[in-house]
Image (spheres, rainbow, N blue to C red):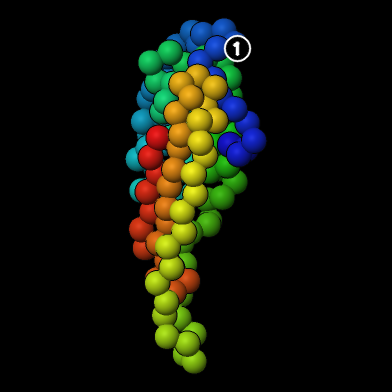
Amino acid sequence: MQSTSKLTKLGSPALEDPFMYRSVVGALQYATITRPEISFSVNKACQFMSHPLETHWVAVKRILRYLKGTLNHGLLLSPALPPKPPSLKALCDADWASDPDDKRSTSGAAIYFGPNLVSWWSKK
């Protein structure tokens, strides 16, 4: 999903088969365990489980196309370079009240040990 695309509760017709949407998004939630780069997009899709629209289904299909095109990608954990000891870095970001539906903020953080991501969180 493009970071510039905005999914909202209004704007397109309701999906005819919401069961299919819920099933696919549920499977994508499971896939985020091994593919954390899709977590943001899957989280956005999950926010519309109760009343999915056609635009939401288009976004889910885009996630599926991304996964199909990146089947051979994986996570690489690399050691810190010998001259430098590994460092612990924490990064955070916030998006204040940008959701047009509920005006709630989204924030998150990522923690790196050397070049490796060891923990992250996102909260709305």
Residue 34 % position (x, y): 39, 51
91 w.r.t. 113: above or below: above
Residue 74 in picture, x, y percent from top left? 48, 59
Quadrant that contains the N terminus: top right
Above-or-below relation of 37 to 100? below
Q: How many marks?
A: 1
| Residue 19 left/right relative to 6 | left
For image coordinates 64% across by 35% down, the residue present is 4
Q: Secondary structure at mark 1?
A: loop
Q: Residue furthest bottom?
A: 83
Up-down: is 110 above or below 12? below
In the shown orientation, is residue 69 left or right of residue 29?
Answer: right
Is residue 77 at least partly visible in the picture?
no
User: What residue is pinned by disc 1?
Assistant: 11
Which residue lies at the image location 44% right of the left edge and 28% below the top edge? 104
Residue 102 image offset from top left, x and y in percent: 46, 21
**In what quadrant of the picture does the C terminus appear?**
top left
Disc 1 residue type?
Gly
Look at 53% across and 57% down and name the residue there.
73
Q: Is residue 1 visible?
A: yes
Instruction: Pick whichever, 55 or 67, lies toward us.
Output: 55
Q: Is residue 24 left or right of residue 70?
A: left
Q: Residues within 10 Å of mark 1 (few under 14, many from 20)?
A: few
